[in-house]
């Protein structure tokens, strides 16, 4: 990578040298003598200054791009290396973790245990790592079941299954949490509305009062607003009451 960048930079410098030399040959009769006369510098010194300026103007973007490219490459390599180390460590921890007494692993490549109504026989028993008591009970299971007590039969069932069908069909109590959360939300909203009515909202205008509204109705009747099928048509002007 470094050798390739060096060869590219060398090639670019060579091209820039020829380009700048050609520009000097073209502009020497029009620009150079006026510049020398204005600055007072001798002709070779002015050539060197202009040459260095041209080279720096062409080289500086390349150097900045190359530095950014190298920096991003190093950062990417560092992040990749750290990610690989993290994955390796997590894989090692999972491989050395061992089996639990209860089958609660989430390795989808292995048979899974599910408490589902449509799966009466899961692919894996609930408790796959047995202790000495469980092993003796499993050996006793191979004999006549009449020799097993009720507690032993229940213990054998719990080795195979986590929940019974009545336990799986039992309704959840989650609705209590939902209803409680709704009441809490409504209560907080009501408190906010009451607080706004006392400390935020301005006082009601006088047009909201009953006296003002009664006077407004009387004025509309006196003006005979919509006398055919509207407001005034429902008022009996002779009896002074609503029809």
Image: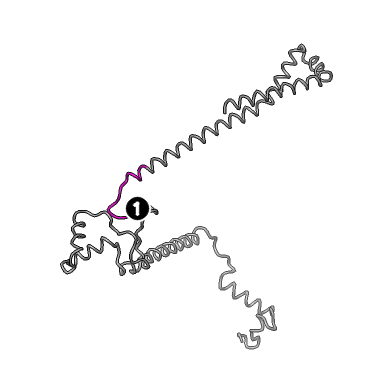
Tell whether position 116 is magenta. no
Above or below: residue 31 compared with residue 231:
above
- Residue in view at x 65 percent, y 88 percent: 238
For label 1, the crowd category at 10 Å Cα-Cα, with few meaning under 14, some 14 to 19 and many 20 or more, is few
Q: Is residue 108 left or right of residue 231?
A: left
Could you say where residue 8 lies in the image, as x and y percent from the top left? 64, 26
Residue occupying the far bottom of the picture? 239
Which residue is label 1 attached to?
105
Place of residue 68 in the rendered image (x, y in percent of width and height, measured from the top left): 58, 31
State the residue at coordinates (73%, 13%): 45
Q: Is residue 95 left or right of residue 199?
A: left
Among the 4 quarters of the image, the one containing residue 3: top right
Instruction: Please state if 198 lies on the left or on the right of 51 as rendered.
Output: left
Looking at this view, name the residue that lies furthest to the left: 147
Answer with the quarter of the image where residue 28 lies. top right
Please state, as top left, top right, bottom left or bottom right, where the N terminus lies in the image.
top right
Position of residue 93 in the picture relative to residue 159 (left or right): right
Q: Nearer the viewer, residue 240 or 73?
A: 73
Magenta region includes residue 95: yes
- Where is residue 176 shown, x and y percent of the image? 37, 66
**Residue that extends furthest to the top in the rendered view of this protein:** 42
Is 96 placed above or below 168 here? above
Q: Is residue 219 above or below residue 151?
A: below
Image position, residue 116 (x, y; %): 36, 65
Residue at 70% across, 21% down: 53
Q: What range is drawn magenta here?
A: 92-105
**Camera-nearest residue between 7 and 158:** 7
């Amino acid at each position: 990578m470094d050798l390739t960048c060096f060869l590219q930079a060398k090639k670019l410098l060579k091209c820039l040298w020829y380009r700048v030399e050609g520009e000097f040959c073209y502009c020497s009769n029009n620009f150079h003598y006026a510049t020398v006369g204005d600055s007072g510098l001798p002709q070779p010194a002015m050539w060197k200054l202009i040459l260095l300026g041209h080279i720096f103007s062409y080289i500086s973007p390349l150097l900045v791009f190359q530095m950014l490219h190298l920096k991003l490459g190093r950062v990417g390599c560092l992040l990749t290396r750290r990610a690989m180390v993290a994955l390796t460590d997590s894989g090692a921890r999972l491989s050395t973790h061992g089996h639990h007494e209860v089958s609660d692993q989430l390795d989808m490549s292995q048979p899974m245990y599910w408490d589902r109504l449509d799966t009466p026989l899961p692919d894996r028993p609930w408790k796959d790592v047995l202790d000495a008591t469980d092993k003796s009970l499993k050996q006793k299971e191979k004999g006549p079941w009449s020799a097993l007590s009720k507690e032993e039969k229940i213990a054998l069932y719990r080795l195979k299954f986590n929940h019974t069908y009545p336990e799986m069909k039992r309704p959840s109590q989650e609705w209590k949490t939902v209803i409680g959360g709704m009441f809490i939300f409504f209560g907080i909203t009501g408190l906010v509305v009451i607080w706004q009515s006392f400390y935020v909202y301005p006082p009601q205008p006088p047009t909201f009062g009953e006296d003002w509204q009664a006077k407004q109705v009387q004025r509309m009747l006196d003006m005979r607003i919509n006398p055919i099928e509207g407001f005034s048509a429902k008022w009996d002007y002779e009896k002074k009451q609503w029809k």
